[in-house]
Every structure is written in structure tokens, then in C-alpha cells.
Amino acid sequence: MTPTPQARTAPLRTLLAVGLPALAACAALALTGVLDPLHAALLVVVVTTTVALWRRLDDGEEAPWPDAVHDRREGARNDVSELGWATFTRSGAVGDRVLRRVRDLAAARLAERGVDLGAPGGPEAASRLLGAEVVDGLAARRPVSRAEVHRWLDALDTLPTAAPSPDRPEGRPQR
């Protein structure tokens, strides 16, 4: 079922609504001597015709844009772009999304070595591997600077390689 177009105003009503004010304005111009009577009458006709045609033109229906296909794959170009924009807040601190991903990375790297930050004795074991300053920063919930995140990532990179397990050869994390 197609939608019915809105009813347009009647042509006579349009002519009156536009023509009478145009006639009054042009009469004032003719009486004050700005325009001679012939040009004033022609101006009324031109203005009324132009406005009437403008209103009668069919706007038509605009074709909608097709929906964009969002093929979202983990690590795809969109993720890299979004992560890049989410890296820093307006104040220059590292954004929450980046902090969450770095903390998840640290938890995964420590779990490969049998260290759980949430377990009793976990923070002490993590401090021996990463350093107390890095573990305190990972656990803190405060604004973090770019340099501090760099120190965390450097400490994670210097972790010794985990012993290979049967389900993960060469100690690599599962993907």
C-alpha cells in the first residue's frame, strides 16, 4: 500500500494568498513612483506565477540510502580505528577502553604464568614478575598517563616466555 500524498492547497487559495500581498506591495511601489503602473502589474504577475509554480512542483519521495553492511570481525580495521580514537580522553589521560584492554592483556599474560591478581598472594607474585609499581598501577582506578601505560606494556613484554603446554604449543596464547 503506497502512502497518499498530502493534499495540496487549492490553486485559487494559493493565488489569493500570494497575489494579494504582491498586488498591495506593487501598488505601493506604483503610487510612490518607484515603478510605473505597467511594470508594477508585471511584477505582480511574475511574483504570483513564480510562487504558485514553486508550490506546485512535486518534491517526490527521496530514495533512502541503503543500509551499510557492518561485517564486524575482531581486530578488523574498525576496531583499530575505534581504539585509536578511544586512546586518550580530552584531558590527555588514557581512555577507559584502552585501560580495560591493557588490564585484560596483563591478566592473560600473568595467567599464562599461573598468576591470578584476584587470588590471595597473586599481587605479590605479579609484583615479582612485573614490579610493584606496574601492579599497583594496573590495580588502581585513577586517570593514567601515556608514559605509565608504556611502562606497563614494556613490563609485559619483558615477561619470560611461559612453558609450552600441550593445548598451546610454544606458550602462545589461544586466539
Image (cartoon, grey):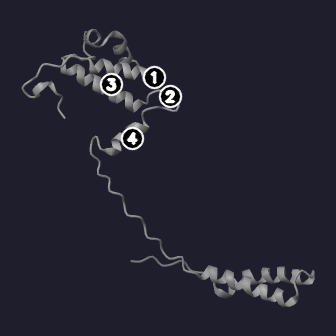
The reply to whether discs 4 and 2 touch (Cβ–Cβ < 8 Å) is no
Say which element carries label 4. Answer: helix
Circle nearer the N terminus (3, 2): 2
State how far apart marks 3 and 2 are (Cα).
19 Å
Q: Give left or right: position of 16 versus 71.
A: right
At x 87% / y 89%, what residue is drawn?
37
Camera-side mark, 3 or 4: 4
Circle nearer the N terminus (3, 4): 4
Q: Name the residue under label 4.
A: 82
Q: Mark 3 points at which residue?
A: 103
**Which residue is nearer to you in this view: 159 or 132?**
159
Circle nearer the N terminus (4, 1): 4
Looking at this rendering, what residue extends furthest in the left direction? 166
Q: Name which residue type carries label 4.
A: Glu
Q: Mark 1 points at which residue?
A: 145
Q: Could you tell me residue 155's position as x and y percent?
A: 31, 17
The reply to whether discs 1 and 3 touch (Cβ–Cβ < 8 Å) is no
Say which element carries label 3. Answer: helix
> Which label sits on residue 92?
2
Name which quarter of the figure residue 55 lies in.
Answer: bottom right
